[in-house]
Image: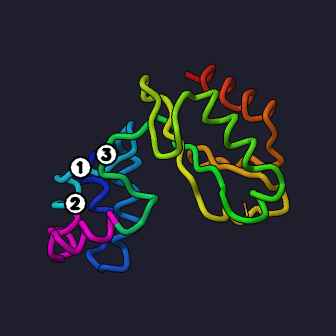
């Protein structure tokens, strides 16, 4: 869906701003917002560009830099931490060859830290794009990455 079609989905009321920014970001293969996206959102909602920029930089779910085609949000909250998350996180870093906050050189994955994903019962957990994975261990994350790579 192009930017104008996305803008048309949302009546120009500021409570729609977060959802609009989500859609604009998801419309880009590399999951980020451009300066033009922020300007279009500001014009659509009759808000100052500085306000929209402030919103987009306040929430970690938005990025103003190109990310990977898949965004991994790895939970770092206490339940996941206690259930072995530290070692699973290290395995993810090793398998991807990047640190948290970085994108693989092939732009396939961005690895991010996340606060609680709301699935503490299956800790440790992570979200890849819109899918949540729980009960993670070193083998399971390797097989998840492998199956996502095969989906290409
Ligand atoms: S602490 Fe990780 S999902 Fe809640």
Q: Say few, some or many: other residues with alpha carbon within 10 Å of mark 1 (under 14 / 14 to 19 / 20 or more).
A: some
Mark 1 Cβ inside 8 Å of ligand 1: no
* Residue located beneath label 1 in the image: 34
* Residue located beneath label 3 in the image: 65
Start-end of magenta stretch: 41-57
Q: Are marks 2 and 3 in contact (CB under 8 Å)?
A: no
Give the image's coloring scheme: rainbow
Measured in 3D between alpha carbons, the distance from the residue under mark 3 to the one under mark 1, in whole angstroms, is 8 Å
- Residue 60 pos. (x, y %): 44, 61
**Of marks 2 and 3, the one in the foreground:** 3
Between 12 and 116, the residue placed more toward the observer is 116
Q: Is residue 125 left or right of residue 72?
A: right
Q: Is residue 45 magenta?
A: yes
Vertical comparison of 6 with 43: above or below:
above
* Residue located beneath label 2 in the image: 38
> Of helix, strand and loop, which one carries label 2?
helix
Say which residue appears at 52% left-offset and 43% top-offset.
71
Q: Is residue 83 left or right of residue 31?
A: right
Give the quadrant of the N terminus.
Answer: top left
> Of helix, strand and loop, which one carries label 3?
loop
Q: Are marks 1 and 2 in contact (CB under 8 Å)?
A: yes
- The mark nearer the N terminus, 3 or 1, is 1
Vertical comparison of 147 with 32: above or below:
above
Mark 2 Cβ inside 8 Å of ligand 1: no
Say which residue appears at 48% left-offset and 29% top-offset.
108
> Of helix, strand and loop, which one carries label 1?
loop
| Image quarter of residue 80 | bottom right
């Amino acid at each position: 869906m192009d930017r104008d079609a996305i803008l048309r989905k949302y009546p120009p009321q500021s409570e729609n701003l977060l959802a609009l920014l989500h859609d604009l970001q998801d419309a880009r293969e590399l999951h980020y917002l451009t300066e033009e996206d922020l300007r279009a959102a500001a014009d659509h909602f009759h808000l100052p560009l500085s306000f929209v920029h402030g919103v987009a930089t306040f929430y970690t779910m938005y990025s103003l830099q190109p990310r990977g085609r898949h965004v991994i949000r790895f939970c770092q909250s206490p339940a996941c931490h206690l259930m072995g998350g530290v070692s699973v996180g290290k395995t993810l870093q090793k398998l991807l060859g990047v640190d948290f906050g970085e994108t693989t050189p092939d732009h396939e994955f961005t690895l991010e830290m996340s606060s609680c994903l709301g699935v503490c019962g299956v800790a440790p957990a992570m979200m890849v794009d819109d899918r949540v994975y729980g009960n993670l261990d070193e083998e399971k994350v390797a097989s998840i990455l492998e199956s996502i790579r095969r989906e290409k």
